[in-house]
Amino acid sequence: MIGIDYTLSPEAKYPQAIEECVAVSQFFLQHGPDYGIDSQNMGYAGDSAGAYLSLASYLWQRDTKMDTGYIKGMLLYTACIALKTPAPGVYIVANGMV
């Protein structure tokens, strides 16, 4: 587990915190084995603002054509994220079946 001490607003202006998280991800993608980390099997997690940064970091990398294949999963805790179309998991949770 790696904790990222990103710069907080209002001192940091968008997209500084996202860029910091992406830089850390890319560092460990390249240098993970030096720290005993399997850099091809990592995940993102965050709570509240950290959840948004986790998702935003992934989307930033995807949209700028960076490698995202090493990200095997995400745990986005207490994130209020709108989906264009409901995913099956959203439907199940919304109907109390989980």
Image (spheres, rainbow, N blue to C red):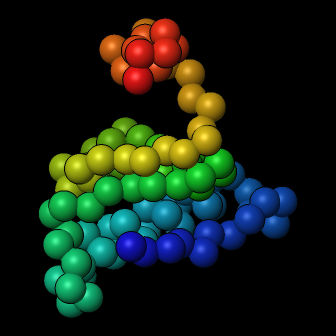
**Residue at point 48%, 51% (across, down):** 54
Q: Nearer the viewer, residue 7 or 35?
A: 35
Residue 84 vertical position relative to residue 64 in the rendered view, above or below: above
Q: Position of residue 26 (x, y in %)?
A: 33, 68
Q: Nearer the viewer, residue 15 or 21?
A: 21
Q: Nearer the viewer, residue 2 or 13?
A: 2
* Residue 40 left/right relative to 77: left
Q: How many marks?
A: 0
Quadrant in which the N terminus appears: bottom left
Farthest-out residue, right: 10
Q: Position of residue 50 (x, y in %)?
A: 59, 55
Residue 90 vertical position relative to residue 38 in the rendered view, above or below: above
**Quadrant of res 42:** bottom left
Q: Is residue 42 visible?
A: yes
Residue 10 vertical position relative to residue 96 in the rendered view, above or below: below
**Residue at point 57%, 29% (across, down):** 81
**Residue at point 43%, 68% (across, down):** 23
Q: Position of residue 90 (x, y in %)?
A: 44, 18
* Residue 38 left/right relative to 20: left
Q: Nearer the viewer, residue 81 or 62?
A: 81
Residue 16 vertical position relative to residue 38 in the rendered view, above or below: above
* Residue 66 left/right relative to 76: left
* Residue 9 left/right relative to 68: right
**Quadrant of res 88:** top left
Q: Position of residue 98 (x, y in %)?
A: 41, 23
Q: Is residue 64 visible?
A: no
Farthest-out residue, bottom: 34
Farthest-out residue, front: 97
**Residue at point 26%, 52% (across, down):** 71
